[in-house]
Each structure stands twice: as C-alpha cells, then as structure tokens.
Image: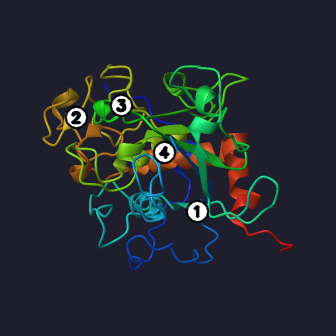
Amino acid sequence: MKKKKIPKFALTLLLCMALACSKTDEGMPPEEPESNPEVAFLPVVVHIIHNGEAVGEGPNLSEKRILRQIEILNEDFRRKEGTRGFNNHPESADSMIEFVLAKQTVDGKPSNGINRIDATTVIVPDMGYSQNHYAQYDYWPPDQYINIWVTPLPEGVMCLSLGISSGPNTDLPGNDLLAVPGPNDAEGMLINWMHFGESEIACHARYGRTVTHEMGHYLGLLHPWAGNNCEFNDFCDDTPAVDRVVHGDTSFMGCQGEMVMIENYMNWSEDDVMNVFTKDQIARMQYVLENDPGRNSLLTSKGLQPPQNL
C-alpha cells in the first residue's frame, strides 16, 4: 500500500534546477546571493552559548567555523556541484531555499548573524534541555529570524546528543509527529557545539549535517520512518517506505521490497553519505514556507537586509 501523499497542490510548486555555483573559500563569508525571485532566502541568527572561553576555544566557536556551517547548509539545500551536498539522484532537486546570516539585529543595528553569550555572566532558571531554556539567554523574534542556539554540552555527550528542532504548524499530514511549540514556547533549534560545522571529532556527525537535518524538521520534514509504520511514515512517496530507524552508512530492505534511501538527510545516517532531499520533501518544505505564517514572514524579514540608516 502506498503512503499518503502530501496535498497535490503542494507538489505543483515550482522545483527549478539552479545554475551551477562556484564554491566560496572555506571560512569566508558567502557572496551576496544573486537576485532570483524563485529562491527563498531565510535569515538565521546563531546564538553561541559558551562558558567564558576565548573565541575559537571549546563552545565559543570561531567565526570561520560558523560561516562554514552556513555554507554547508546552503550546499546541501541548493545541491551545489563540487560539494558534499551534490547528487545526481533522479528523485532529488535543488530546494531553492537558501540561508543568510542576519544582517541586522532586532533593534536595527548592523549584525553578522553571530550572537555570542557568556553563560557564566547570566543566571537563568533551569528549564531542561529545551528551546525554552536557551531562549532565556537571547531570543530574536521567530517570525523574523531562525534562532539556532549552539549549546555548550560536555564532551562526554559527543555523538549522543546532536540536535533538536521545533516544527511548523500546518495542515500537512504527519505534522503532529513534529515538535510543534505551544503558544508560550520558543521556536528554533539546539545544536551541540561539537556537531556545528566541520571538525575532526571521533564521530560520524562531523561534517555539519546535523544542522541540515534539523533545518529539515524546522521546515516540516519527518524522519522517513516517522511513526514506524509502513503505510503512514513521512508522507513523501519518493522516499522508500521504512518502519524502523535508519542509521549508519549501509542501506537495507525497507517496506514493499524497496531499499531504504540511506543518503537522505532526514535519516540518522552518517554525515559522509547524506546528500539527498527528494522532490516531495522539497515540495513539503515549500508548502510550509507558503502556508505557515511564522515561516512565511521570514521571506520578507528585515534580517535579510542591512540597516537602512547607518
């Protein structure tokens, strides 16, 4: 039995192939995005929560590493040739979604999209490992910025705690399986500092794909196994049905005699094999951007533009 599809009108959204782009120098700010009305640009603020370390040490990640993570995110979402994010899978495409570090703060001051916060100088109530807890350090309006909190977890949880993300609130099937915030809950994602950007850590998640995966959830994507049910899992027909967690780097037989798509970003696969968003997954994300008011307003956020009066 086939899985339930996402609404047909969502699948009619334009999925254009992007022109090949040259890769920017590692660690350098990406070039200004070319004017393209078909590309959805979304502003990101990276809150670096640290414990007083110097910039570049421990959780207080270097600017180079932060910039590289955003570059990786765009390589993956734009399926850029010459990068780890490229593939020639017939069910894949360029998502036409691109991320920009915020160019101005909430109060209109110039910004590089990086907000460093020394947690040793701020006392906040313990609310567990949640967006609500880290939003106490700083939280930019979620209808104008994608908040990413890079959290200073101990090295002992490396490869165990990677990241979590809130989901959108839409009428798409399976939306109830996402972590949709309540009325007073903070939106955004938490990323363990050890898994933000590229590194040489002894873990399969060292090439920046944790952020790609969590951004997929933020834009409405489910794990391919979702509710562990062959009939109703991620509601995308072009991801082979599977009823159990997919991890590692080797495919196996899923439901209906199909091999699982081990390379899909929404699995728990190893970073070095991930490189596919499918066309149905892309259509689902585009539907969220059009129909969730909080996600849609990101498209016209002031954070995409530098302040007018400097």
Residue at figure coordinates x 42%, y 70% from the top left: 27
Residue 247 is tagged as 2
User: Can you give x and y, in whole percent of width and height, for residue 99 in the image?
Assistant: 55, 59
Q: Residues within 10 Å of mark 3 (few under 14, many from 20)?
A: few
Quadrant position of residue 205: top left
- Residue type beneath disc 3: Ser
Q: Earlier in the sequence, mark 4 or mark 1?
A: 1
Residue at figure coordinates x 61%, y 73% from the top left: 36
Q: Which residue is mark 4?
A: 215
Whole-number angstrom distance, CA of label 4 to CA of label 3: 16 Å
Residue 100 is tagged as 1
Element type at marker 4? helix
Contact check, label 4 and label 1, Cβ < 8 Å: no
Whole-number angstrom distance, CA of label 4 to CA of label 2: 18 Å
Q: Is residue 106 left or right of residue 212?
A: right
Residue 161 is tagged as 3
Q: Residues within 10 Å of mark 4 (few under 14, many from 20)?
A: many
